[in-house]
Image (spheres, rainbow, N blue to C red):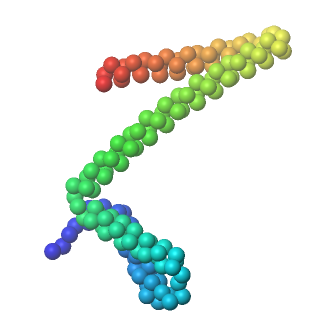
Amino acid sequence: MKNKIYNKKTFWLGIFFLLLSLVSVRELIFFFDSMSGGKIVRVLMHLVFDTFVGFWLVQESLNYKQTIRAEQEKDEREELVNLKSAHASIIIIQIASLILVIVAVIVWYLGRIDGLIGAALLGSAVAFGIVFILTFFSQLVTYLYYYNKI
């Protein structure tokens, strides 16, 4: 009976763990006399763990339903990561624009700068203020929209 491999990456990872368990068996066979009690226990724990994980991964890669479920979980995780990164980027933009507004106003006020440079400082302060307000309200509106949608 020939089984189809549905997830090759998981399959080869399982084979890798099974090979690690063979290394543990080899170590137990050839170096058992020179090992201390703690080393024997550690090698046996590696053997059991590697064998269990290897068989589990190979079995999972050969099962169609588990492969589909793993792909769905991976998609959900990627969606969550995308949402969190988008939220973090909005927060970073808000903080940066607020800091730039404060710096521009302080430089303009303390420097008593008039003319074109003063107007540029005030203009940049207003522009960064608008960016801050837009990101704040867009975050608030999208939160309320999705809160009411769900």
> Is residue 11 shown to the viewer in this render?
no
> Is residue 59 shown to the viewer in this render?
yes
Tell me the quarter of the picture where residue 57 sits. Answer: bottom left
Residue 120 drawn at (x, y percent): 72, 16
Task: Give the residue at x 58% y 15%.
Answer: 130
Tell me the quarter of the picture where residue 126 sits. Answer: top right
Residue 18 drawn at (x, y percent): 37, 74
Task: Give the residue at x 83% y 11%.
Answer: 112
Indicate left or right for 24 with 55 as reference.
Answer: right
Task: Give the residue at x 40% y 68%.
Answer: 49
Indicate left or right for 75 with 97 as reference.
Answer: left
Indicate left or right for 113 with 17 as reference.
Answer: right
Residue 107 drawn at (x, y percent): 79, 18
Tell which residue pokes out farthest to the left in this image.
Answer: 1
Task: Give the residue at x 55% y 16%.
Answer: 133
Give the answer, above or below, for where 91 lies relative to 122.
Answer: below
Tell which residue pokes out farthest to the front in this image.
Answer: 37
Give the answer, above or below, for where 88 lies relative to 25.
Answer: above
Please state which of residues 37 and 82 is positioned toward the viewer in this rendering.
37
Tell me the quarter of the picture where residue 9 sits. Answer: bottom left
Looking at the rendered image, the quarter that the C terminus falls into is: top left
Looking at the rendered image, the quarter that the N terminus falls into is: bottom left
Please state which of residues 57 and 83 is positioned toward the viewer in this rendering.
57
